[in-house]
Amino acid sequence: MAIRIIGTGSYLPAKVADNQFLSTIVDTDDEWITQRTGIKERHLSNGREEGTAYMASQAALSALENAGVNAEELDMIIVATVSADTYVPSTSCSVQGAIGAIRATCFDINAACSGFLFALNTAYAYIEMGMARTVLIAGAETLSREVDWSDRSSCILFGDGAGAAVIRQEEGEGGLIASVTGSDGSQGDVLTCKGRGIQNPFHNSRRKKDYLKMEGQAVFRFAVTTVPRCIRQILKKTELEPEDIKYFILHQANVRILEVIAKRLKVDIEKFPMNLDRYGNTSSASIPILLDELNREGLLQRGDRLILSGFGGGLTWGAILLEW
Ligand code: ACO
């Protein structure tokens, strides 16, 4: 039996902000952003109605249609996000309500930009244990609500969007084969979005402004050392070589990060599909959006070996090897 992705979906808001538009908000320009990041434009939410739960629901419906699965067949919904619309209900419960997945058990996880990988592993574990048969996972973010729009070093990087996948156990070979994950909370301060203080009768440490903050160069160094390491670990574990992998589907943060990773692994950059030029960094949504694009373009054939890999705040990282 194989536990595999049987359908994918994604959703991007219609509103697009290109680099030229951002240069009217902060002191930057298209040349700087393109050279340092590869990003040309990003999609941004249209407001409260187009929040994380809405985008996740749209991506979920599209993944269900692609998989040929009804919402009532879902046993579980797991949404990875760092930008939920509400503390309660969880985004996954809101998705359940929106799509009518009446039988599903729902919960969110937060592993920042590695979130989709951790959700995929969690779905795998539940199915492998016989505790679920059909699971919908999504990565969905409205990062535009967390970004400091006066900080030119970070606001140019991020975008909004959602991606989803349906996971099911089926007859046959392949599916999810191996995974490597890790976390390092001692380095958590290099990328934070504190957002909440404590407000009770004894304390009031709630700050008006506590947006996403990042030490860009530290994150860059972390990404280009950790991602190649965990990809090498997974290749070793499965006794495969980089040549055996069709695509390395990586978290879409920065073209320079992907180029360094490809170089360190001695793999042709052509094997690293990218869409960050159009969407920027959508955190936990970036891997499933890219996966959905490849799937819908007919670039994934049964039996293709793929490595999904990412890194994120926390710090967190992971790599998953699967056979499509
Ligand atoms: N436009 C113009 N100039 C800028 C901008 C901007 N948008 N942002 C910063 N600068 C300036 C800085 O002020 C600095 O000026 P100075 O030399 O006069 O002080 C200069 O450009 C260089 O700044 P650096 O921070 O050294 O630029 P760097 O080459 O490191 O690029 C960047 C910054 C793009 C953030 C890079 O460090 C990076 O990509 N880091 C990884 C971050 C990342 O990908 N995070 C992903 C989010 S985390 C996640 O996905 C898990």
Image (spheres, rainbow, N blue to C red):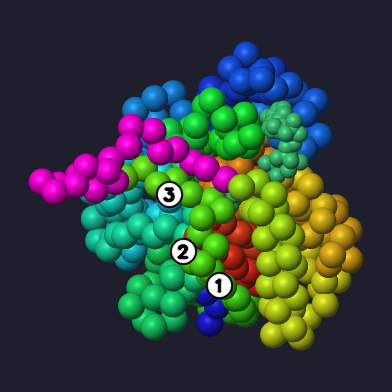
Q: Which residue is mark 1?
A: 182
Residue 274 appearing in the image: yes
Q: Position of residue 291 (x, y in %)?
A: 63, 52
**What is the quadrant of residue 214 in the picture?**
top right
Which of the two discs, 3 and 2, sits closer to the camera? 3
Q: In 3D space, how far apart are the residues under numbered discs 1 and 2 (Cα atoms)? A: 14 Å
Using a 10 Å C-alpha cutoff, classify the residue at mark 1 as few (fewer than 14 neighbours), some (14 to 19) or many (20 or more).
some
Disc 2 on helix, strand or loop?
Answer: helix
Q: What is the span of residues highlighted in magenta in the rendered image?
A: 197-214
- How far separated are the C-alphas under marks 3 and 2? 13 Å
The answer to whether marks 3 and 2 mark residues whose Cβ atoms lie closer than 8 Å is no
Pick the front one: 25 or 287: 25
**Rendered residue at 52%/27% (across/down):** 149
Q: Amino acid at mark 3?
A: Val
Work out whether mark 3 precedes mark 2 in sequence or the reverse, and give the earlier one.
Answer: 3
Toward the top, the furthest residue is 24
Residue appearing at x 61%, y 47% in the figure? 215
Q: Residue furthest left?
A: 201
Identified by mark 1, the residue type is: Gly
Residue designated by label 3: 82
